[in-house]
Amino acid sequence: MFTEISVNDINDFRLGHASNKEAGTGVTVIYFPDGATAGCDISGGGPASRETPLTMPMTADNPINAIVLSGGSAYGLAASDGVMTCLEEHGIGYNTGVSLVPLVCQSCIFDLGYGSSKVRPDSTMGYEACIKALMKAGVVNTDASTAANSDSNDPVQGCIGAGTGATVGKIMGMKQAEKSGLGIYSVKAGTFTMTAIVVVNALGDISDYETGKKLAGLKNSDRTEYISCEETLYQFMAPRDMFTGNTTIGAIITNAAFNKAELNKIASMARNAYARCINPVGTMADGDTIYAASTAKRGDSEAVHVDINFAGTLAARVMSAAIKNAVMNSKISDEEFLSMVK
């Protein structure tokens, strides 16, 4: 029924990335040329987020302009300053009558234990990621000089943007963890499309949602084999200050028409993907967050309409596939990994 497609075949949104490979951090901007209605589900105990109330049904029903995913923990929230500046400069935002105010939601992962803890996504990096998204959307004209600075030669998935410093299996610290990154998976059925974008930076192990095979996670002290993160957690029954450098953040994007309340439900159903693929998940040491966005234009009589149960169930499936892609596209050697961790 569904056909996998490239994310580049979808015109309802555009991605822009800024990556600092040496510092191990980055920013990903999801830009919506015609705006998007959005919902959000937060299941982790320690989210670093910005403007998530815009996704709540009881707040004003204004389309958002972008979702930002970044590293840097709460420091990385500064990236949205640059995204807002970039959007405002190009005439994009909510018109208040006296100025444009771009509506931008953001969530961050904790990647300060990979690479440099002193280099975090900032306004400049947010601006860079946003301008790349606008270039792809045709808002900004490209020439030879700007094209040379675009991310056209970067990988579509893996260690890019917000996934640059993502890691998994960290319950025993970074020396026993593994590299992860950013994953994408898109499908279509007729005129209906759905995409999952996720940055996998989990406390727990990652498994294949179809086979149950462990793909990445906690390794033993000499890194010769995997051990169970769940079983390791059970050794700490007494209260403890568990390592908190985690959080899996992502977005489900569809062209089907839904309101904010429905998108909040779809986001919560997409969370089932986290349970299928990540163990443990949703702990107080995580900040797990999922956005759900509809790019259907308001009042469009030809907009795609599908059942919410259909959409939520499919959201969990495409998110599961994106989680797998995040891990499988981010593999690096033990030597390279250990050179980047503390």
Image: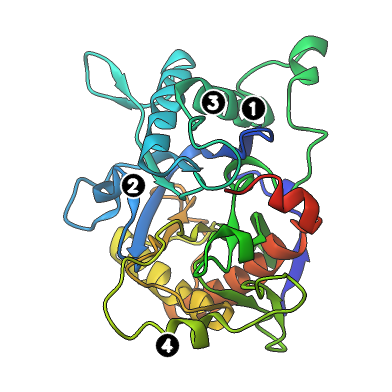
Name the quadrant containing residue 17: top right
The residue at which mark 3 appears reads as: 125
Sequence-wise first label, 3 or 2: 2
Sequence-wise first label, 4 or 2: 2
Q: Position of residue 222 (x, y in %)?
A: 72, 70
Of residues 122 and 82, the one drawn nearer to the viewer in this rendering: 122
The residue at which mark 4 appears reads as: 234
Q: Position of residue 83 (x, y in %)?
A: 46, 27
Tell me the kind of residue under disc 2: Ser
Disc 2 is placed on an element classified as strand
- How far is disc 1 from disc 2 in space, using C-alphas? 22 Å
The residue at which mark 2 appears reads as: 49
Disc 4 is placed on an element classified as loop
Sequence-wise first label, 1 or 2: 2
- For label 3, the crowd category at 10 Å Cα-Cα, with few meaning under 14, some 14 to 19 and many 20 or more, is many
- Visible residue check, residue 336: yes
Q: Position of residue 291 (x, y in %)?
A: 42, 57
Name the quadrant containing residue 219: bottom right
Is 292 above or below relative to 124?
Answer: below
Sequence-wise first label, 4 or 3: 3
Q: Residue at x 66, y 45 (%)?
A: 340
The residue at which mark 1 appears reads as: 132
Tell me the kind of residue under disc 4: Tyr
